[in-house]
Amino acid sequence: MSRRERIETWLNAVWGKGELDRIDALFEDSAQANGLMPGLELRPEEFHELVPALRAHLKDIEITILRQFETSDWLWLLLRIEGRSSQTGQSACFTGQLSMRFAGEKIVEAYNNFDVVALFEALGVMPRDTVALCLSGESFV
């Protein structure tokens, strides 16, 4: 199975189905994932808290790889994440990017970026067109 196939299977098992026992299989113990929030570096064990936190808001999650680029030890993916709000049933769709360095078959470092504004807009936590509103001078504080 290729790295892409392993990651896609893992993403849909962990994030899509909530199979937390599969988290550690893909990461070196000392691996860190960066980029979800400024200053937040996640270790594999912290995904055991993050995954249920997201799944409390988003259900029926399906992840599709739209693009990929791979070198000998790096894999970059562009993802589409689809699901439904756990509270309203409203559909949600947003994109994300993963950049992962491998040592053998395990991830040793990762840099992730997700369009959380689109996610929170779809969940009704932020108003539609949040970015445009902010660029026009609106404030939400």
Image: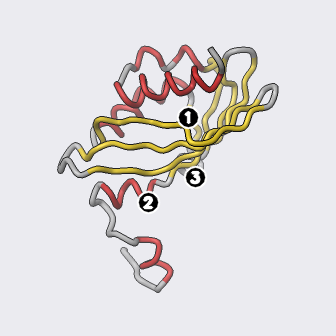
Asked whether the residues under the numbered discs 2 and 1 touch, taking CB atoms below 8 Å apart as contact, a structural biologist would say: no
Looking at this view, name the residue that lies furthest to the bottom: 137
Q: Residues within 10 Å of mark 3 (few under 14, many from 20)?
A: few
Callout 3: helix, strand or loop?
loop
Q: Is residue 81 left or right of residue 104?
A: left
**Front: mark 2 or 1:** 2
Residue tagged by mark 1?
42
- What is the C-alpha distance between the residues marked 2 and 1? 20 Å
Looking at this view, name the residue that lies furthest to the right: 72
Q: Residue at x 73, y 30 (%)?
A: 101
Label 2 is placed on what type of residue? Val
Residue tagged by mark 3?
38
Report the colour scheme: secondary structure
Label 2 or label 3, whichever comes before in sequence order:
3
Whether 21 is drawn above or below 40: the answer is above
Q: Quadrant of residue 65?
A: top right
**Residue 78: numbered disc:** none
Residue 6 locus on image (x, y percent): 57, 20
Please tell me which residue lies in front, 135 or 2: 2
Whether 76 is drawn above or below 17: the answer is below
Label 2 or label 1, whichever comes before in sequence order:
1
Residue tagged by mark 2?
117
Q: Residue at x 69, y 31 (%)?
A: 109
- What is the C-alpha distance between the residues marked 3 and 1? 11 Å
Q: Quadrant of the C terminus?
A: bottom left
Residue 35 locus on image (x, y percent): 60, 46
Callout 2: helix, strand or loop?
helix
